[in-house]
Image: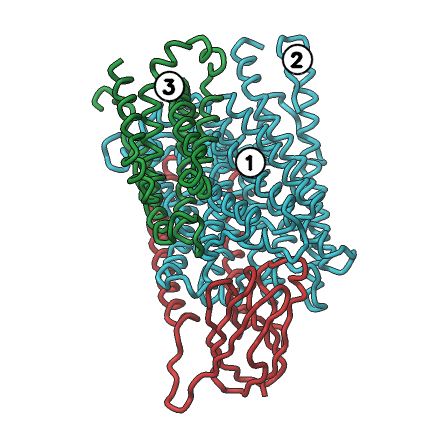
Chain colours: A cyan, B green, C red
C-alpha cells in the first residue's frame, strides 16, 4: 500500500465503524419489529407495556441508526470534495452511543414508552405507566443524539461554505441563475449534503425546542404549553429528520452507479432545480401529518396535500429517472453494490406511491394512523434507504479489500427484496382493511396480515444478517491487511 | 484601556439605584436589557483581567470550551423566571446577579469566543436559538403568573421580546449561510 | 366502493407500472450502447413524461380537493345537526349521546382532557369511515351522517399510553 492508500484507509476507519455499528443495531431493531408483528398476529403473548416499549425503541432506533449510517455515506463521499473534520465525526458517534444508551435505559429499565413521537403531554401524563426518570432519560438521550448530529451538520455546512462560498452555491443556485457554467456545478454529493445540512439543522433546532419543552413539563407539570404547536414542532422534527436519511443515502447511488456504468452523472440544471425543490418541500410538507387536526388553518392542510404531491416530482422526474437512464443499455456489471443501489431507487419510487395517496386529504380521512402509514415508510426506508446503506457496505468492502460475493449473498439479495416487500405489503393490506397503527393487540380480522408480515420479517432479518456477516468478514480481512503497518493499532468496531 | 473604561462606566451606570429600579420594574427590560448589558459590561472590562491572568486563562480555557460552558450555564440560570423574581426580592440574589453576569459570563464569553472554532461558535449560536424560541413560547403561553413581582401581562410582553430576538437570529443566520462567504475582502 | 379500495387499487396499479419500468431497464442494462444518444432520447421523453405527470397530478389534486372533510355541510331548514360532545380521556371516550337515527346529520365535537387521542369511527364491517384527532385545549369536528343502521365503534387512533388498544366506545344507529 502506498502512503495515499494508507491515509485513505485510516480516513475510512470511522466510516467503517459507523456502518458496522449500524448493521448490528438494524438487526436488533428488526427483531423488535418481528416480535411486535408476532404479538399482533396472536402468535406470542407480550404484556402491552413490553409491546409499547418495543414500539418506542424500534421507531427511535431505526430512524436513529439509519441516520447514522446515512451520515457515514454522506461523510465518505462529501469528504472527497470538501475537507471535513474527523474529530467531529468521532464526537457524533460518541454522542450517538451515549444517547442510545440513555434511551435504552429509559425505555427498558424505567419502562418509558411514548413511541418516538413523544406527543406532548404524553411524556408527563402516562397514566402512571412510567415515571419522571424514564421520561428524562429518553428525552435527554434524544437531545444528546441531536447534539451529535447538529455538530455533524454544522461541520458539513462549514466545509461546504468554505469551498463553494455559501449554502446557496452548494445547491448550485449560481448555476441555476446562469452565473456559472453547468459543467462547473457542484457534484451530486455536495448538492445532496447541502440540502440535508439545511433541512436537518432546522429539524434538530425544532426538535430541541420540543424536547426541552417536554423536559420542562415533565419536571414541573404546572408549566403547560400549546399542544398544537408542540405537535407541529414534533412532526417538523421527526418528518424532516427521517426524510433526510434517504437524501443522504442517495449520494451512494449517485457515486456507485456512475462508477459501475462508467457514465457521468453530472449536476444539470434540472437536477439542481429538483434538489432545491426537495429542500423547500421537505422543510414544509410535514403538515401532512396534521391533516386530521381540523383546528389547523385550512390553507395549511390544503398546502400540505399540494406540496406532498409536488415533493414526489423531483424524485420521479429527476432522481429516479436519472438512475434509470444511467443504467439503461450501459453494460453495467451487476453485483451486490450496484444491485442493491438500483433496487434502492426502485424501493424509493415504490414508497412514494402509497405516500402520495395517503397525503390526499380525503384518503387520509380514512387511512391516517392505520397501518397504511408504516406500510409506505417501510417500503421507502426498508427497500429504499436501507438498500442504499447495504449497497454502500458492499461497495466499501469491494473497494477496500476486493471482497468477493458468494451464492449466500446472492440468495440474501433475493430474500431481502421479497422479505421487505412482504413486510410493507402486509402493512399496506392491513391499512386497506382499516387496521389501526400502534395497537398491541389485534381483532381477529386483522391478524392474518400481521402474521404474514412477521414471517416476511423473519426472512428479512436472515437476509440482513447475511449482509452484515459479509461486512464483518470484510472487517476481519481489513484488520489482517492492516496488520504490520503502523495503523494496525487503530482498532475497528 | 479605553474599552475597559467604557465597560466600567456602563457597569457603574447600571448600578445607580434609579436605573436599577427602572430596569427592574419592567420584566422585559430586566431580562432583555439589564442582563445583556451586564454581560456587555463584563465583556468590555474583561480585556484587562484576561491580560492580567493570561496564564490562568490559557491553562484552564485553552480550547474555549470550559469558558463557554460556564457562560451557557450562567445565562441559562438567569433565564429561569423564578431567579428573576428572587433578584428583585432578595438582596444577595441581586448581588449575585451583578457579579456573576459581568465577571463570570461576560469575561468567559470574551475569552472563549475568539478561541472557539467556527463549528463551536455556530453550535453555541444554534443552542441559543431554540432556547430563546422556547422562552418565547413559555412566557407567551403560560396561563399562570410565574413571578410574584411581575404580572401576567409583563410575562407575555417578555415572551414577544424573546420571539423577536429569535426571529432576528434566524434572519441573521440565513443571510450568513446564503450570502457569499468566498469573497470576504468585499465584505 | 370504499375510499380504501380505490386507494389500494390505485397504489397497486402504479406499483405494477414501476415494477415493469425498473424491470425492463434492468433487463436492457446488459448490452452496452453509447450514452449520448440515449441521453438525448431520454431527455426528450422526459419532457413528455414530466408534463404528463404534472398535468395528471394537478387533475387529481383538483378532483380530490373539491370536497373536504373539514367543510361544514349545508343543513336544511328543519334539519339542524345533532351536536355530540366527545371527550377522550386515558383510556375511554365520554360521549354526550350514543344513539342516533340513520340519516340524522351529526357533528362530533372532539376534545381530550389529558393527552392526544384519535377519534376513528368504524362501521359494522370494521371499516374506518371518518376520523379526527382528539387534542387537549382544542376541539376538532367531524361532520357525518350515518346512512346505514347498525352497531358502530369508535377506536383510538393516536397512541396515548399502555391501554391505547383498549380505548373502544360503541354506539348505535337505528
Circle nearer the viewer, 2 or 3? 3
From what the image shows, is residue C144 above or below residue A28?
below
From what the image shows, is residue B72 above or below residue C139?
above
Residue at the farthest right position: A44
State the residue position of label 2: A489
**From this viewpoint, is residue A417 visible?**
no
Circle nearer the viewer, 1 or 2? 1
Callout 3 secondary element: loop
Q: Quadrant of residue B32?
A: top left
The x and y percentages for residue A215 are: 54, 45
Query: Marks 1/2: CA distance?
Result: 28 Å
State the residue position of label 3: B114
From what the image shows, is residue A257 above or below residue A224?
above
Residue at the farthest bottom position: C78
Same chain assignment for discs 2 and 3: no
Nearer-the-camera pick, A327 or A479: A479
Nearer-the-camera pick, A160 or C73: C73
The x and y percentages for residue C125 are: 63, 76
Q: Which mark is residue A145?
A: 1
Q: What residue is drawn where x is 67% and y is 40%?
A: A104
- B143 left or right, relative to A391: left
Q: What residue is drawn where x is 72% and y is 48%?
A: A458
Same chain assignment for discs 1 and 2: yes
The x and y percentages for residue A192 are: 42, 36
Query: Marks 2/3: CA distance?
Result: 36 Å
Amino acid at each position: 500500500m502506498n502512503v495515499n492508500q494508507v491515509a485513505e484507509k485510516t480516513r475510512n476507519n470511522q466510516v467503517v465503524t459507523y456502518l458496522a455499528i449500524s448493521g448490528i443495531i438494524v438487526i436488533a431493531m428488526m427483531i423488535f419489529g418481528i416480535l411486535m408483528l408476532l404479538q399482533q398476529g396472536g402468535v406470542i403473548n407480550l404484556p402491552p407495556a413490553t409491546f409499547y416499549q418495543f414500539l418506542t425503541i424500534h421507531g427511535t432506533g431505526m430512524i436513529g441508526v439509519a441516520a447514522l449510517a446515512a451520515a457515514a455515506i454522506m461523510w465518505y463521499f462529501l469528504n472527497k470534495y470538501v475537507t471535513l473534520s474527523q474529530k467531529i465525526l468521532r464526537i457524533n458517534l460518541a454522542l450517538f452511543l451515549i444517547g442510545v444508551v440513555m434511551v435504552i435505559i429509559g425505555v427498558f429499565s424505567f419502562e418509558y414508552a411514548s413511541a418516538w413521537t413523544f406527543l406532548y403531554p404524553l411524556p408527563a401524563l402516562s397514566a402512571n405507566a412510567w415515571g419522571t426518570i424514564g421520561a428524562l432519560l429518553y428525552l435527554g438521550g434524544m437531545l444528546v443524539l441531536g447534539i451529535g448530529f447538529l455538530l455533524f451538520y454544522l461541520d458539513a455546512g462549514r466545509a461546504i461554505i468554505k469551498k463553494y462560498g455559501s449554502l446557496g452555491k452548494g445547491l448550485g443556485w449560481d448555476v441555476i441563475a446562469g452565473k456559472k457554467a453547468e459543467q462547473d456545478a457542484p457534484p451530486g454529493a455536495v448538492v445532496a449534503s447541502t440540502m440535508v445540512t439545511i433541512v436537518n439543522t432546522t429539524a434538530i433546532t425544532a426538535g430541541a425546542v420540543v424536547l426541552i419543552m417536554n423536559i420542562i413539563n415533565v419536571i414541573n407539570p404546572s408549566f403547560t404549553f400549546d399542544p398544537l404547536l408542540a405537535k407541529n414542532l414534533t412532526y417538523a422534527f421527526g418528518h424532516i429528520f427521517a426524510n433526510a436519511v434517504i437524501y443522504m443515502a442517495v449520494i451512494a447511488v449517485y457515486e456507485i452507479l456512475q462508477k459501475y456504468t462508467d457514465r457521468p452523472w453530472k449536476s444539470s440544471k434540472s437536477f439542481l432545480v429538483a434538489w432545491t425543490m426537495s429542500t423547500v418541500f421537505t422543510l414544509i410538507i410535514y403538515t401532512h401529518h396534521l391533516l386530521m387536526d381540523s383546528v389547523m388553518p385550512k390553507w395549511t392542510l390544503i398546502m400540505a396535500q399540494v406540496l406532498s404531491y409536488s415533493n414526489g416530482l423531483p424524485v420521479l422526474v429527476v432522481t429516479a429517472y436519472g438512475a434509470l437512464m444511467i443504467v439503461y443499455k450501459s453494460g453495467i456489471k451487476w453485483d451486490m453494490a450496484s444491485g442493491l443501489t438500483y433496487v434502492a431507487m426502485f424501493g424509493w419510487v415504490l414508497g412514494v406511491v402509497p405516500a402520495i395517496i395517503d397525503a390526499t386529504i380525503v384518503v387520509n380521512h380514512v387511512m391516517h394512523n392505520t397501518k397504511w402509514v408504516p406500510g409506505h415508510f417501510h417500503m421507502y426506508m426498508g427497500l429504499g434507504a436501507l438498500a442504499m446503506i447495504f449497497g454502500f457496505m458492499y461497495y466499501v468492502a469491494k473497494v477496500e479489500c476486493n471482497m468477493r460475493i458468494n451464492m449466500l449473498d446472492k440468495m440474501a439479495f433475493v430474500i431481502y427484496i421479497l422479505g421487505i416487500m412482504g413486510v410493507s405489503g402486509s402493512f399496506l393490506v392491513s391499512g386497506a382493511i382499516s387496521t389501526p397503527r400502534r395497537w398491541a393487540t389485534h381483532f381477529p380480522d386483522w391478524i392474518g396480515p400481521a402474521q404474514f408480515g412477521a414471517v416476511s420479517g423473519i426472512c428479512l432479518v436472515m437476509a440482513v444478517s447475511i449482509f452484515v456477516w459479509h461486512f464483518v468478514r470484510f472487517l476481519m480481512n481489513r484488520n489482517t491487511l492492516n496488520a504490520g503497518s503502523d495503523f494496525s493499532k487503530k482498532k475497528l468496531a | 484601556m479605553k474599552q475597559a473604561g467604557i465597560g466600567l462606566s456602563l457597569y457603574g451606570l447600571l448600578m445607580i439605584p434609579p436605573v436599577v429600579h427602572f430596569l427592574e420594574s419592567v420584566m422585559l427590560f430586566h431580562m432583555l436589557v439589564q442582563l445583556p448589558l451586564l454581560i456587555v459590561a463584563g465583556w468590555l472590562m474583561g480585556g484587562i483581567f484576561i491580560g492580567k491572568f493570561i496564564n490562568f486563562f490559557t491553562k484552564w480555557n485553552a480550547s474555549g470550551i470550559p469558558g463557554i460552558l460556564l457562560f451557557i450555564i450562567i445565562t441559562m440560570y438567569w433565564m429561569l423566571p423564578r431567579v428573576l423574581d428572587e433578584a428583585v426580592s432578595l438582596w444577595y440574589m441581586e448581588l449575585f446577579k451583578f457579579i456573576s453576569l459581568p465577571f463570570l459570563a461576560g469575561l468567559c464569553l470574551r475569552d472563549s469566543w475568539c478561541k472557539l472554532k467556527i463549528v463551536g461558535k455556530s453550535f453555541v449560536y444554534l443552542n441559543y436559538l431554540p432556547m430563546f424560541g422556547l422562552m418565547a413560547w413559555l412566557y407567551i403561553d403560560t396561563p399562570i403568573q410565574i413571578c410574584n413581582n411581575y404580572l401576567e401581562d409583563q410575562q407575555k410582553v417578555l415572551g414577544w421580546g424573546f420571539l423577536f430576538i429569535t426571529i432576528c437570529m434566524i434572519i441573521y443566520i440565513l443571510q450568513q449561510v446564503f450570502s457569499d462567504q468566498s469573497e470576504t475582502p468585499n465584505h | 366502493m370504499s375510499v380504501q379500495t380505490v386507494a389500494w387499487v390505485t397504489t397497486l396499479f402504479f406499483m405494477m407500472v414501476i415494477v415493469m419500468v425498473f424491470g425492463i431497464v434492468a433487463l436492457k442494462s446488459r448490452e452496452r450502447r453509447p450514452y449520448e444518444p440515449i441521453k438525448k432520447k431520454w431527455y426528450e421523453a422526459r419532457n413528455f413524461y414530466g408534463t404528463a405527470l404534472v398535468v395528471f397530478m394537478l387533475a387529481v389534486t383538483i378532483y380530490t380537493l373539491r370536497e373536504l372533510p373539514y367543510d361544514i355541510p349545508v343543513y336544511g331548514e328543519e334539519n339542524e345537526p345533532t351536536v355530540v360532545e366527545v371527550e377522550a380521556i386515558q383510556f375511554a371516550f365520554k360521549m354526550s349521546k350514543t344513539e342516533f337515527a340513520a340519516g340524522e346529520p351529526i357533528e362530533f365535537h372532539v376534545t381530550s382532557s389529558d393527552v392526544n387521542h384519535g377519534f376513528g369511527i368504524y362501521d359494522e364491517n370494521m371499516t374506518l369511515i371518518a376520523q379526527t384527532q382528539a387534542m387537549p385545549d382544542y376541539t376538532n369536528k367531524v361532520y357525518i351522517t350515518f346512512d346505514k343502521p347498525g352497531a358502530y365503534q369508535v377506536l383510538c387512533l393516536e397512541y396515548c399510553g399502555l391501554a391505547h388498544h383498549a380505548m373502544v366506545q360503541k354506539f348505535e344507529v337505528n
